[in-house]
Amino acid sequence: MTANEYKGEHGGEGVAHDGASFEQALRGAEELRKSTGRLRIRLRTLRLTMVGGASAILVVVFVAAGEPRWELSGLAVGLVGAVAAGLRAERSVRSELGRHEERLERTVGMLREVFVHVSRREQWEKSRVRRTRERIARFSIDERRLW
Amino acid sequence: MADTWDGIREEWDAAVQLVNGSRSRSNEQLGATRAGLGLSQYPIALTGEPGAGKSVLFDALSGHTGVGDAESRRSPDREEGHRTFLLGSTKLRVSAMVVPGQESLQRERAMNRILSENTSPKGLIHVVCWGHNKVWDRTGQRALERNVRAPDGSISADGTRDWHLEKELVDFEKICDRIIETGAATRGLRWVIVAVTKADLFWNRIEEARDYYVPGSDSAGHHHSAESGFCTMLRDLMDHNDRLRVAVVPMSSQLIRHSFSESLAPQLSQIDSVGAGRLRESFYRTLRRLT
């Protein structure tokens, strides 16, 4: 079951109450972290592309100011359109990234809170406790501040 | 070792008596001052569970105190500060690192930095609060409440405290294991203070808190059979590190009401700012003695 399928009794992120649900939620959080990583790369790429596009627009305008040609005007209009499309895409990715990060923080916050109790109640082996702790310790306190 | 624990209990009781007014204050000046030139570095670390009050304690020790709910806030990743504590006639530039309480990247990095095969602070203040931890995120709070809720749906303060105490115990175990495994006491760690913060919130049960955190013995020098897990760990730490000095002191960094749950009335401070100030003085006195 994936992070998206892990639901609590109220349909949102649930509270892990035993080892199995804890493991499920942790795996889900690890998947979410990977997907937020991919979204961040996408966002960075989009922004770099827009910066590049905006710079190209400025160059074209500068050149056209000295030597007016209809081809340059067309190029400038095309670049503006591309940057506008990039802005729309950037907004969409940013929004999706925000949702992922928020969900990741909520899940990891829950896992940190219940870890000790679930592991002690079920008397996990020391090796399992250590491995699980190492996995939780790979998450940042505030995932959003990584960006 | 029974003498050590008796001494620690006496120091605790002396701090309580100072607040209750049954012991007179000394006239010596204690507190923090600005750093000067030519001071030797004295690295210390503050550890403890999330919401125990590490950062507030650090601020209080260096003179940045406040009163009221607005002062309480979640700490950023890892705090490092360089403040000066005036301890008797020796000014020390205390280089303090507050280690995040949450299992996280930042905590791992901080712990590797302060307590490893090659590094060790000179002193470690482990902050506990007898189960009065503040839970910062709503998901964590919801998880807590779901687990401590009684069959009739009610939540009790003691149930919430027990939840936090269990985590606190495991956290202290990790710290003790780390001190032992890295041999910190042989490389530089000279003292450990267990700072029992937010004592103003449970002042009416302060003896109970003392018995939870300070090992005791009967007149024949035998351990009390009903000793808490925390006491057992503290004894174990001392048994493995006979050169390490330990103190357990009550502390109140800031008078802030505490809320165990939205369904419970907030717990209010049971001492005033004068009393809290006296606890801080006792803490400084302990710090001075150990440094």
Image (cartoon, rainbow, N blue to C red):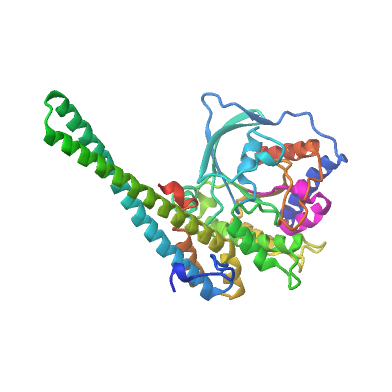
Q: Residue at left 53%, top 73%?
A: A21
In the picture, the quarter occupied by the C terminus of chain B is top right
- Magenta stretch in the rendered image: B193-213
Q: Residue at left 58%, top 67%?
A: A15
**Figure quadrant of residue B57:** top right
Q: Can residue B215 be seen in this view?
A: no
Residue A1 pos. (x, y %): 44, 74
**Any magenta on residue A138?**
no
In the picture, the quarter occupied by the N terminus of chain B is bottom right
The image shows residue B26, relative to residue B266, as above or below, that is: above
Residue B28 pos. (x, y %): 75, 29
Q: Can residue A103 be seen in this view?
A: yes
Residue B143 pos. (x, y %): 61, 63
Q: Which of B138 and B203 is in front in this view?
A: B138
- Residue furthest right as drawn: B22
Q: Residue at left 41%, top 53%?
A: A97
Q: Residue at left 75%, top 50%?
A: B7
Q: Which of A56 and B150 is in front in this view?
A: A56
What is the number of callouts on the image?
0
**Magenta part, dominant SS:** helix
**Figure quadrant of residue A70:** top left
Left or right of B139 in this view: B229: right
Left or right of B198 in this view: B91: left
**Figure quadrant of residue B226:** bottom right
Residue B186 pos. (x, y %): 52, 51
**Any magenta on residue B194?**
yes
- Residue furthest front as drawn: A70
